[in-house]
Image (tube, helix red, strand yellow):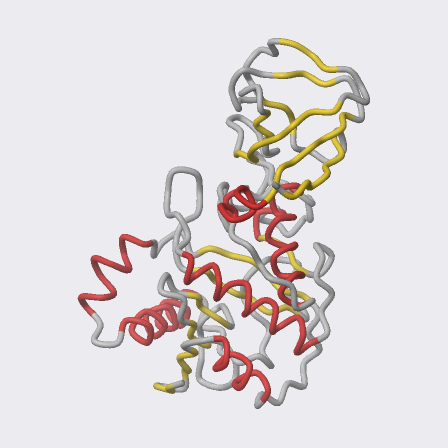
Amino acid sequence: MKTKNSFTLLENEKDVKEWLSKQKVTRAINKLQVHHMDLPNYSTWEKTDKKVFSEPHFGRTQSLNSYGKNKWGYSDGHGHYIAQHFNIFPDGKITTGRNLNSTPIGIRGWNTNAICIEIYGCFDKGKDKMTSAQKKAVIYLYGELCKRFNIPVNTTHIRPHCWFTAGGTYLGKYNSSRSAKTCPGTAFWGYGCSPDGFAHFIKDVKNYVDGKKVESKKEQTKATKFEIVTLDKLNIRKVADWDADPVTTVKKGQHLQVIDTVDAKNGNTPMYRLESGLYITASDKYVKKYLIRRV
């Protein structure tokens, strides 16, 4: 743990726990925001930050602070102008930002009583793929904040920026024509920010808070076999694309074997890839999932 210009570098889970335990917070906190930086992205990290700054984590944090001072000039009362409270870098290290006793500049209409976290990178489809080190840090930072401030791990208290309009209206999901931004990314966490997709992130944070092992998406695929039961008559497609014409349908109550969960084109809801190689919705509104351990 190292501090420079009143920003602190948290290098691991232990540092996060220790730093949080020492903070005297008088502001009520019961909400956590989820953001990606978009720009800077992973290319910026490799081609600029690591080459321009002698200490890239501090250099980028100071740059973000300077941007805030010039852009909105809203100080946290402790000499900081940066919008967010934490920055999570591609290598898994974290820097502190705005003082925790100061309201963030993150989501219009949802800043009061909130903590703003920015994840370095752009996690839209086809852009940056989150490193395992960064993903691990994201989980334990959100998890430790939930434990420190007794925040329930659900979407009432943890929400992505894209679930709001630019004016601050809450949508409850990403809407490409109404959301303020795609933030934290249309491929965030490997699933995107539909309610079903974002639920995977919430589940990982909750598992951390509950002391359960958080498995990677690859580990989950290897370790389990899925069986689903359809809750309605459903379309089956040859490709994972909501605009693709159905090739057949299945009746309500039919049992199907699933081998993977994938992002689907032209929609916000993921799809299940069946053993047959065909695709069906992964929405829990239409299918019930069972996990069967491989033997």
* Residue 132 shown left or right of residue 202 in the figure: left
The part of the image, by quadrant, that contains residue 63 is bottom left
* Residue 12 shown left or right of residue 175 in the figure: left
The part of the image, by quadrant, that contains residue 226 is top right
Above-or-below relation of 6 to 167: below
Name the quarter where the N terminus is drawn.
bottom left
Above-or-below relation of 39 to 240: below
Name the quarter where the C terminus is drawn.
top right
Q: How many marks?
A: 0
Residue 257 lies, in percent from the top left, at 65, 28
Residue 127 lies, in percent from the top left, at 37, 43
* Residue drawn at (42%, 52%) of the image: 130
* Residue drawn at (67%, 81%) of the image: 27
* Residue 60 shown left or right of residue 33 in the figure: left
Residue 262 lies, in percent from the top left, at 53, 34
* Residue drawn at (67%, 66%) of the image: 31
